[in-house]
Image (cartoon, rainbow, N blue to C red):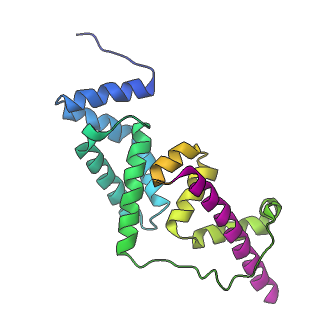
Amino acid sequence: MSKIVIDHNSDNERLRIGWILDGKREEFAWFVNRYSQQVIDFTSRMLSNAEDAKEVAQDAFVKAFRSLDTFGFQSSFCTWVCRIAYRESLNRLKRQQPHLVDIDNLPAIEDDDDELSTGREERIVLMEEAIDDLPPDERMLLHLYYYENRPLRDIVYIMDAEPNALAQRLHRIRKKLLRMIKQKENEQTER
């Protein structure tokens, strides 16, 4: 029997999903082996506990396996399982104590995005601290867009949001980060 080798990833995924749906369930291991670390890294951005992140990633793969017949190939399999992992992470967070930041007490700022890119090392440290203080879904949005350079269409799909709403949300988060950084700078100068 000759082995079929397909270079194009989406064709390979489509072929393997067909095999799984035809009863070759063991083929799903290929997806788990190929994408599990990516999905764990993804869930770790939202969940601070490493074991929770691994468990949610595993749950996402189980749900993906059970729902494989509904996968419509509008995205890659990895993007689809990340969408499932995102929702599972949000569900896990809802069952936990929420981490809230009171932005009402943050000082008002001018809309000056250049200040976020000054390159000063202290500002970078303050920005990282401010990002850590954001709610998990906002951290995830920033991570997907700025650190992973995911296309907006993938983020829209993963987070189940409208493109314009997501773009506005990114803008609001940047403004919020700037206020938080300014507050942290003010706190440092008062010491």
State the count of labels: 0
Residue at 57% across, 56% down: 166
Would you place residue 48 above or below residue 185 in this image? above
Do we see residue 42 in this rendering? yes
Residue at 64% across, 83% down: 104
Q: Position of residue 53 (x, y in %)?
A: 39, 60
Q: Position of residue 78 (x, y in %)?
A: 42, 41
| 109 inside magenta stretch | no
Is 71 in front, or is 44? Answer: 71
Q: Quadrant of the N terminus?
A: top left
Q: Residue furthest top?
A: 2
Q: Is residue 64 left or right of residue 182?
A: left
Quadrant of the rendered image containing residue 73: top left
| 186 inside magenta stretch | yes
Q: Residue furthest bottom?
A: 191
Q: Is residue 97 left or right of residue 119?
A: left
Residues rendered magenta in the picture: 162-191
Q: Residue furthest left?
A: 23
Q: Position of residue 24 (x, y in %)?
A: 19, 30
Q: Is residue 138 left or right of residue 93?
A: right
Q: Position of residue 97 (x, y in %)?
A: 41, 79
Q: Characterize the magenta stretch by its predominant secondary structure.
A: helix
Residue at 70% across, 82% down: 106
Do we see residue 53 in this rendering? no
Is 115 in front, or is 152? Answer: 152
Q: Quadrant of the C terminus?
A: bottom right
Quadrant of the rendered image containing residue 72: top left
Residue at 63% across, 59% down: 168
